[in-house]
């Protein structure tokens, strides 16, 4: 019954990962320790980070290396996303950080990921109609992994340890070392181990070797294969005050998919326990997740800090102007606030409508009081153009002289010469006969007719 427990646990976690990731929304982003992909990707380290937090560590990102981080960080998880080495200034900062008492550095070397093993493992759990798709994706991932081996991807090495690439990937068939599971410690180099503890599924691509400066650093192999390939090691130094480095040559051992396997879970538990036992209080962890870009190192010099850039706005006496400027801007915002809101609907006036012209002319005539003048012009038009002699628009008695409007729109300050020209133009216009074809308005009612018949053009009633 005990031998089936790891297999059941592996099946349950694989099913859960399959349900979360799925086939259509598959994510294989490598090496992320924060963000959504750190937990949804099979190659992320979100599960390992959650395990560190559950052990009592407070976590934070290390996007910039400062003196404050050097004093307030006990554990650093360094997980590069690619094989680009870290810049020299950042490496010197880490070396100085290791001189602090009881520090722990966990270095996770990048590899090609666990995409092939994911499709191979979940193929048996997939529906029958999707197994062919899983088999195709597994073959594609295997081809991509083989192509990546031909690229010049030399793993980075530092003064504390060396990461070497194997001639060909090695499948773990046996484990030895101080951290090896009890069921896997006894093995023969000529026979495979078939114990109760399963072995990691992802093959090894790199191994950990001794430090570049063995006089100062000491490398202790914690886990190795039956072919003496070290993949987990511990580095200590006489210059460090109880600090230590744990080097994992394959990042797939601690990835989200890797932690679905029992031996990798035991490895993560061993690393976290060793980091927690190095310091009894104030467990603070930082995650260094560089992607090839150099990290900024803040080196504070002695003396008072000198403001620069926007910091000048907070220094006296400029800070006094800054406060007043902020208050003035707030008042301006309140002043402009009432004009905000929905736009007003403005009536769209079409200038091409001829009815507007008629309304404008009628309005002008109404303003100057020229009703009699208008009726005279209409009567004259009906007589000359239409040839009518009687009707509602025909005045009974034509005026002897042209009726002028009640009010003259001509400016009073015109010169005598300009006034004579205007009078001559009006006289010539009155003699001309327009060729208009307008139709008269409908006839007035009987009451209006009787009132019109008993009235004179000048507005006086007939006796």
Image (spheres, rainbow, N blue to C red):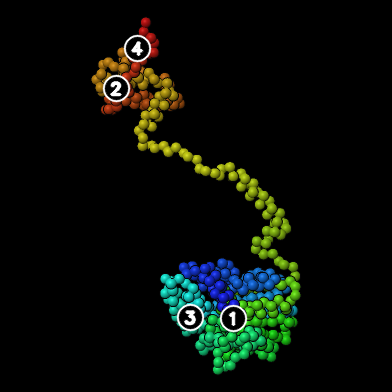
Sequence-first disc among 3 and 4: 3
**Residues packed near mark 3 inside 10 Å, few (<14), some (14 to 19) or many (20 plus):** some
Q: Which residue is mark 4?
A: 450
Q: Quadrant of residue 391?
A: top left
Q: Which residue is mark 3?
A: 145
Q: Quadrant of residue 178?
A: bottom right
The residue sitting at 38% across, 9% down in the picture is 461
Residue 90 appears in the figure = no
* Res 3 label: 1
Cβ–Cβ under 8 Å for marks 1 and 2: no
Q: Nearer the viewer, mark 3 or mark 4?
A: 3
Q: Nearer the viewer, mark 2 or mark 4?
A: 4
Q: Nearer the viewer, residue 378 or 423?
A: 378
Under circle 4, the secondary element is: helix
Tell me the distance, in whole angstroms, between the alpha carbons under discs 1 and 4: 122 Å
Q: Nearer the viewer, residue 361 or 3?
A: 3
């Amino acid at each position: 019954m005990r031998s089936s427990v790891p297999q059941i646990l592996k099946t349950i976690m694989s099913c859960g990962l399959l349900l979360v990731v799925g086939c259509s929304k598959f994510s294989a982003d490598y090496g992320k320790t924060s963000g959504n992909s750190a937990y949804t990707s099979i190659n992320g380290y979100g599960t390992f980070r959650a395990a560190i937090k559950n052990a009592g560590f407070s976590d934070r990102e290390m996007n910039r290396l400062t003196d404050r981080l050097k004093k307030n960080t006990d554990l650093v998880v360094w997980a590069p996303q690619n094989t680009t080495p870290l810049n020299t200034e950042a490496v010197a900062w880490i070396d100085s950080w290791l001189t602090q008492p009881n520090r722990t550095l966990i270095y996770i070397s990048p590899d090609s990921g666990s995409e092939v093993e994911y499709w191979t493992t979940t193929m048996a759990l997939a529906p029958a109609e999707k197994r062919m798709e899983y088999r195709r994706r597994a073959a594609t991932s295997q081809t991509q992994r083989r192509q990546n081996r031909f690229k010049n991807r030399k793993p980075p090495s530092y003064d504390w340890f060396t990461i070497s690439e194997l001639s060909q990937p090695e499948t773990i068939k046996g484990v030895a070392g101080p951290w090896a599971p009890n069921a896997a410690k006894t093995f023969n180099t000529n026979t495979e181990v078939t114990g109760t503890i399963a072995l990691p599924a992802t093959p090894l691509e790199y191994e950990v070797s001794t430090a570049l400066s063995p006089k100062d650093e000491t490398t202790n192999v914690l886990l190795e294969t039956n072919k003496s390939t070290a993949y987990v090691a511990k580095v200590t130094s006489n210059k460090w005050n109880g600090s230590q480095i744990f080097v994992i040559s394959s990042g797939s051992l601690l990835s989200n998919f890797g932690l679905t396997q029992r031996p990798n879970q035991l490895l993560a538990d061993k690393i976290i326990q060793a980091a927690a036992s190095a310091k009894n209080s104030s467990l603070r962890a930082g995650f260094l997740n560089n992607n090839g870009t150099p990290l900024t190192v803040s080196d504070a010099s002695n003396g008072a800090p000198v403001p620069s850039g926007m910091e000048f706005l907070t220094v006296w006496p400029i800070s006094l102007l800054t406060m007043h400027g902020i208050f003035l801007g707030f008042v301006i915002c309140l002043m402009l606030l009432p004009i905000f809101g929905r736009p007003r609907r403005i009536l769209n006036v079409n200038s091409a409508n001829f009815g507007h012209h008629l309304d404008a002319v009628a309005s002008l005539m109404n303003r100057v009081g020229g009703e009699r003048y208008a009726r005279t012009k209409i009567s004259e038009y009906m007589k000359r153009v239409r040839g009518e002699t009687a009707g509602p628009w025909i005045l009974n008695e034509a005026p002897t002289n042209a009726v002028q409007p009640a009010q003259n729109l001509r400016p009073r300050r015109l010169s005598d010469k300009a006034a004579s020209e205007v009078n001559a133009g009006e006289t010539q216009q009155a003699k001309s006969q327009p060729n208009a074809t307008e139709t008269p308005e409908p006839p007035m009612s009987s009451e209006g007719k009787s009132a019109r018949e008993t009235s004179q053009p000048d507005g006086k009633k007939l006796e």
